Image: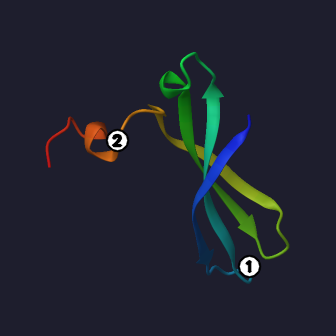
Amino acid sequence: MPVESVSAISRVNDDNGGGWAITLELLELARIPDTTSVLGSYEAVLDANGDLLEAKRIRRYSRNQTDAQQGGGRQ
């Protein structure tokens, strides 16, 4: 899937010398108009050598969705 953006990156400290946790926004389903396309947030954990240890989808959302909408729209 095409990567739309990197939304977070952080250092991970563990028994194996550390690594990185990266959150990527991926295009899961392209639609017309583009604002209705479906994106997914994925977290990838890499070791100190850059090898992939773990990957999981955190959430799925429409491109036009704001953060306030993900929890029912109330803050």
Please tell me which of labels 1 and 2 falls first in the chain.
1
Find residue 36 and report its horizontal and vertical position in percent: 48, 22
CA separation, marks 1 and 2? 37 Å
Residue 66: mark: 2
**As drawn, is 25 to the left or to the right of 65?**
right
In the picture, residue 49 is in which quadrant? bottom right
Give the residue at x 70% y 44%: 3
Q: Residue furthest front?
A: 33
Find residue 37 and report its horizontal and vertical position in percent: 54, 25
Give the residue at x 33% y 46%: 67
Looking at the picture, does residue 27 appear above or below residue 74? Answer: above
**As drawn, is 55 to the left or to the right of 38?**
right
Residue 16: mark: 1
Count how many numbered circles sit on residues in the image.
Answer: 2
Give the residue at x 62% y 81%: 13
* CA neighbours of label 2 inside 10 A, class few (<14), some (14 to 19), many (20+): few
Of the two numbered discs 1 and 2 in the rendering, the one whose residue sits closer to the viewer: 2
Q: Amino acid at mark 2?
A: Thr
**As drawn, is 7 to the left or to the right of 1?**
left
Coloration mode: rainbow
Dividing the image into 4 quarters, which one contains the N terminus? top right
Circles 1 and 2: CB atoms closer than 8 Å: no
Q: Amino acid at mark 1?
A: Asn
Instruction: Decide which of 12, 7 is in the foreground and name it.
Output: 7
Give the residue at x 49% y 27%: 35
Q: Residue furthest left?
A: 74
In the picture, residue 73 is in which quadrant? top left
